[in-house]
Amino acid sequence: MTKKISNPHDRYFQEQFSRKEFALSFFQENLPSEIRTAVDWKHFQLCSGDFVRKALQNRKSDLLYKTKIKDRDSYFYLHLEHQRKSDPTMAYRILVYMVNILEQNRKQFPKAKEWPLVFPMVLYQGKKEWLAPTKLHDLLRVPKILASFIPQFQYALVDLSRLSDEEIKGKVALRLAMLVMKHIDSPEITSFLHQQLFPLIQQLLEKETGLEYIETMLYYLSNTSDYLDKAEVIEIFQELPDNRTKKVVMTLAEQWKLEGQEKGQKIGEKIGQKKGEARLIQKLLKLKFGDEATEYNSQLSEFTLEQLDQVSERILVYQNIDEIFKGI
């Protein structure tokens, strides 16, 4: 039996943004320009292991990267959070993560002379605009008289719902992934794939690791979109001369076929259960009320399983057949 991927949005985010070259392209496009030029990108890497698990509290929709700022010895952490819904408490949550990151860094590097710096960013993929405050002071509604005594920071926000397709920049793999994330809920996703994404897919196939990105994208689409025309997707990819993509699509097609069979089997099982229960109730009614019960047979065949359950319970209680069916 095939298994539907749980949390496919987070899974897609994790798989794509865990690739160093992909994340590097994202930050080089989306960090404020003055910060981007100050970063020493040759030290850029994804954080992993126990450090991240403790710092981010096992959050599967978060990733942590580290690099350095020029002329500083300490690490510069880039904390990226993926969100599908606007969270009004995000500024507070990020404050907690920032403190945890600092604490874990202190434990791992107790002799470090400088404290690390943490830059928080949220990648939002929702259907509506992000409305939550991006500043901690706005969330807490800090009065001016207390402003200098209350921690203050702002997290950077990349809101895909506010970006036009043309504003999504970066290397081809990044643009493809971000456009898919932006349009994943669209009823027109199949035509968008063909008309807008197909040229990017063709470009990506020229890259050594391009197929990995395309395969990840296809599995994300197939496990997430309710509007994807799977038969048309197969036709679209048959236009490509690259046999590697055809193998990926045919593997997916086999998965879709199995999913269809399982869905049909479940529907068939439910129909069979309903028919069996209806026949049993018909026999019970005839046993109790004789031929008078046969006039209700057609009505029973139209009942849902819940309605049939009601009838079966009433057979034991009521002595009048009309009372059994009353109000159902």
Image (tube, grey):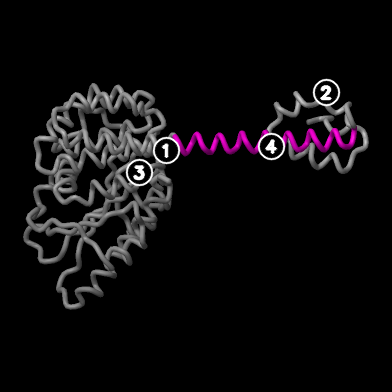
Q: Which residue position holds label 3? A: 9
* Position in image of residue 307 (x %, y %): 73, 35
In space, the residues marked 2 and 3 are separated at their CA atoms by: 53 Å
Q: Earlier in the sequence, mark 1 or mark 3?
A: 3
Looking at this view, name the residue that lies furthest to the right: 319
Question: What x and y, as percent, mark residue 70?
Answer: 7, 58
Residue 127 x/y as whole percent? 39, 33
* Label 1: few (<14), some (14–19) or many (≥20) C-alpha neighbours in 10 Å: some
Residues under labels 1 and 3: Cα distance? Answer: 20 Å
> Callout 1: helix, strand or loop?
helix
**Badge 3 amino acid:** His
Give me the C-alpha separation between circle 2 and circle 1.
40 Å
Instruction: Provide the residue designation for mark 2.
Output: 295
Q: Quadrant of residue 232?
A: top left
Magenta stretch encompasses residue 280: yes
Q: Magenta stretch: give its range.
A: 261-289
Sequence-earlier tag: 4 or 2 = 4
Please give the name of the residue rendered at 23% of the width and 58% of the height, measured from the top-left corner: 118
**On the image, numbered disc 4 is attached to which residue?**
276
